[in-house]
Amino acid sequence: MYRATSLLVSGVVLAGLSAGFLLADEASSEKTGKPSKAAIERTRKTVRMLDDVYKTAVVLITDKYVHDENDFPAGSAAIALFGEVEKKGWHGVRLIDVSGQPYDPENVAKDDFEKDAVRQLRDGKDYVEKVVEKDGKPALRAMTPIPVVMQKCVMCHPHYADAKKGAAVGAISYTLTIE
């Protein structure tokens, strides 16, 4: 009984110390106005989760519902979804062309971060990020590549047929407030 109690107390002490370090990190970031490493890491993890969800949805929509050129494209569904997400104030998210031949003229890099990130994705990076200030708050800008993952992509984007396997033809650009 004593040993179990001792282990439990030790665990609580260690958890308290860990929380103390985390709180100290958070408190010091409030003084400097810069986000803490822990806050940035939480936001980075959220971007990775959203990226996985969005890309999985596009692949599933394409696989199950896009059968010919007359069907509603999954990319258009993603753009509509992204608009609703942003309109509701969750975060900024955009579909961006990396191939140089956008399906829609709106899907091009618009600011310095996006233009630089597109160059890095073309050079083979699989993730680009930058901490910025947006509306007086710290935000994480991130961009991830979209490669051609199925033959159906080429149905609406014939110029993707020449893309190297795994090469980015598009990207998703994210802007999330760091909390």
Image (cartoon, rainbow, N blue to C red):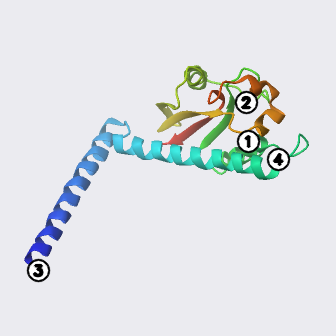
Residue bearing the label numbered 2: 107
Question: Where is residue 152, by image quadrant?
Answer: top right
Q: Is residue 35 above or below residue 106?
A: below
Q: Nearer the viewer, mark 1 or mark 3?
A: 3
Q: Looking at the image, is mark 2 or mark 4 earlier in the sequence?
A: 4
Q: Amino acid at mark 4?
A: Val
* Discs 4, 3 touching: Cβ within 8 Å: no
Given residues 150 and 128, the one toward you in this image is 150
How far apart are the alpha carbons under marks 4 and 3? 63 Å
| Residue 164 placement (x, y as % from top left) | 66, 24
Q: Looking at the image, is mark 4 or mark 3 earlier in the sequence?
A: 3
Q: Is residue 155 visible?
A: yes
Q: Amino acid at mark 3?
A: Met
How far apart are the alpha carbons under marks 2 and 1? 9 Å
Q: Nearer the viewer, mark 1 or mark 4?
A: 4
Q: Amino acid at mark 1?
A: Ile
Which residue does the image show at 65% across and 51% down from the upper left?
88
Q: Looking at the image, is mark 2 or mark 1 earlier in the sequence?
A: 1
Residue 66 marker: 4
How far apart are the alpha carbons under marks 3 and 2? 64 Å
Residue bearing the label numbered 3: 1
Q: Secondary structure at mark 1?
A: helix
Q: Quick check: 119 left or right of 148?
A: left
Q: Quick check: 154 left or right of 69?
A: left
Residue furthest left as drawn: 2
